[in-house]
Amino acid sequence: MEIPFHKPYITSDEVDGVVNALQSGWITMGSTTLEFEDRFREYIGCKNAISMNSCTACLHLALKAINLTEGDEVLVPAVTFTATAEVITYFKAKPVLADIDKHTGNIDISKIERKITAKTKAIIPVHYGGQPCDMDEIAGIAKAHRLCVIEDAAHAIPAWYRQKKIGTISDMTCFSFYATKPLTTGEGGMVTTENDEWTARMKILRLHGISQDAWKRYSKEGTWFYEVIEAGHKYNLTDIQAAIGLAQLRKIEWMWQRRKLIAGRYTDALQSIDTLMTPFVKPDRESAWHLYVLKLNLETLTIGRNQFIEELKRRGIVTSVHFIPLYRHPYYRDAFSYSTNGFDGSEWFYERVISLPIYPGMTDAQVHTVIDTVTELATRYKK
């Protein structure tokens, strides 16, 4: 039987929550969404949490909150999902790509300052696979150059950096609740920040730029009268999604412990195989283990990464690659004249990585099957 790359951990808790939301008669943004924001804020330990319909929306409005404008530049890692850089282009601003640390997949802090210009407005570090970036160093660089730091924490719930939970460190942090993420609402996201002014503005922008609490206008507490005070967007979360999120949040710690256990079993079994390289996590942080990214030691193998993936697939194990570097995509290559030059870490990384299945509902038997199959291939195709 096929082992999928991911399967969301959905139980009767989520189903009951959705049914209750449907039966309440209020299915768009309402009290359940506000409760989800409150519970999330308490869990992270931040001052403000603003829900939206995707992490992309969160990143977009975070940049809008800091008044990003045409011609500005924002630093992002070269290896990330397109959304991280895409939102910068909404402003006719430029995503400036920095190389990554080939060991962690995170932005290489030694490559950041050389990319900063007078046009640079912000840095968006991405916590690759769930492992936090070098946030103290990034904060120091940002402070020296008066830049905002907006963390892309799409992979990083829960995660800790030097005993601080991700979501409490920088100017803003953007989380994803997409179907494959450690906490899912199907689609969704959340911004956390200590800044009340940014919070107020993002709450207005997420619902068409209508004055605060516009969602109440069809409730007994609301009024038909409203004012549009800024051109906004349709980015709000719904109570149906928030009901799923509340159920997920109640078991987030258990789901994280299960992913952590699976990651540990993979590493224990595969770390001694010289054709493979298991993930490196720095000792002063805790990964969310959204991804388990294995790297192939290509110099010791007779096949490449793509064929390794196909061999796994033939044996019923679905894997993925995170990510194709942005400069390799036609849009970024053509629009910003990017090439592979200057991205040695990213190129080395991209050629070798395979993301193995890791999700809370994986059975022990499935984990062992993945281990046995990877071991068999790594041995069979050794030079």
Image (cartoon, rainbow, N blue to C red):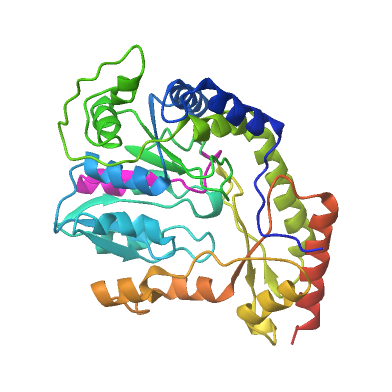
Residue 277 vs residue 196, the one in the foreground: 196
What residue is shown at x 25% (from left), y 31% (from top)? Answer: 204
Picture quadrant of residue 226 = top left
Q: Is residue 105 above or below residue 63?
A: below
Q: How many marks?
A: 0
> Is 26 left or right of 8, judged from the image as shown?
left
Please tell me whether residue 82 belongs to the stretch shown in magenta.
no
> Is 24 left or right of 332, judged from the image as shown?
right
The quadrant the C terminus occupies is bottom right
What residue is shown at x 20% (from left), y 44% (from top)? Answer: 146
In the image, which residues are magenta? Answer: 140-160
Residue 285 percent coordinates (x, y): 55, 43
Q: Is residue 113 above or below residue 220?
A: below
Residue 340 percent coordinates (x, y): 37, 79
Residue 149 percent coordinates (x, y): 31, 44
Residue 128 percent coordinates (x, y): 50, 55
Picture quadrant of residue 200 = top left
Residue occupying the far right of the picture: 365
Residue occupying the far top of the picture: 221
Residue 366 visible in image: yes
What residue is shown at x 20% (from left), y 58% (from top)? Answer: 93
The quadrant the N terminus occupies is bottom right
Residue 295 vs residue 136, the one in the foreground: 295
Q: Is residue 353 above or below residue 123?
A: below
